[in-house]
Image (cartoon, rainbow, N blue to C red):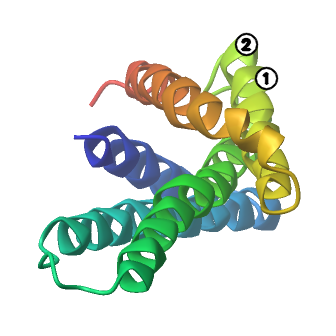
Amino acid sequence: MLLVPVAATLARLVRQGQGQGHGQGAAAATAFAGGLLAGGALASSAVLTWTLGRLPHEAPEALAQALADLSFLTGGLGYAVSFALLAAGTCLAARGSGLLPRACVTTGLVVAAAGLAATLTLLVFVFSYLLPVVRFGGTAWLVWAAFALARSRPAA
């Protein structure tokens, strides 16, 4: 479900970035890569969680713990960092062109900063509170940005 606004936003940005200068095209490519990586992180986490749920009772406890940790890393930290690339690329590509309102750009950059700061979770687990901030705040921002991009489309 989350991939629908991601795809809409990415398609709009890549189309806009192709006709713009080098900086906006690079930002759109960064957003595209971040979107692909974020989708891959969520899919990987889902597969790992599914595998964890299918383990037989006789499976070693270390295997179950390894699968749980990998699922957390891909769905939590991997997604947060990838989404930070998506949000930052989107905001930087749309910043000068007026495709997104200034408040939307600022919010997206804050979400991107939270996603990058979430990497500190690897050092200090206290920073793990940033993961749901990026997941849920980022989803709300992404829907906002997708609607704003759709409204800024020129009439055909």
Q: Secondary structure at mark 2?
A: helix
Name the residue rendered at 54%, 57% in the picture: 79
The quarter of the image holding the N terminus is top left
6 up-or-down from 141: above or below: below
Question: In the rendered structure, which amino acid carries the disc numbered 2?
Answer: Ala
Q: Residue furthest front?
A: 58
Taking the image as drawn, is residue 19 in sight?
no
Q: On the image, which quarter does residue 52 sit in?
A: bottom left
Q: Secondary structure at mark 1?
A: helix
Q: Count residues near mark 1 (Cα–Cα under 10 Å), then give few for <14, some for 14-19, many for 20+.
A: some
Give percent across and percent down for residue 100. Answer: 62, 24
Taking the image as drawn, is residue 6 in sight?
yes
79 up-or-down from 63: above or below: above
Give percent across and percent down for residue 83. Answer: 59, 51
Name the residue rendered at 39%, 76% in the picture: 67
Question: In the rendered structure, which amino acid carries the disc numbered 1?
Answer: Thr
Give percent across and percent down for residue 141. Answer: 54, 25
Q: Count residues near mark 2 (Cα–Cα under 10 Å), then give few for <14, some for 14-19, many for 20+.
A: few
Residue that badge 2 annotates:
103
Q: Are marks 1 and 2 in contact (CB under 8 Å)?
A: yes
Is residue 152 toward the left or the right of residue 23 in the image? Answer: left
Name the residue rendered at 30%, 48% in the picture: 3
54 up-or-down from 85: above or below: below
Query: Between marks 1 and 2, how big is the CA–CA gap?
Result: 5 Å
Residue that badge 1 annotates:
106
> 94 or 113, which lies in front?
113
Name the residue rendered at 57%, 24% in the picture: 137
Give percent across and percent down for residue 93. Answer: 70, 47
> 46 or 65, which lies in front?
65
Image mark count: 2
Disc marking residue 92: none
Is residue 78 toward the left or the right of residue 93 in the image? Answer: left
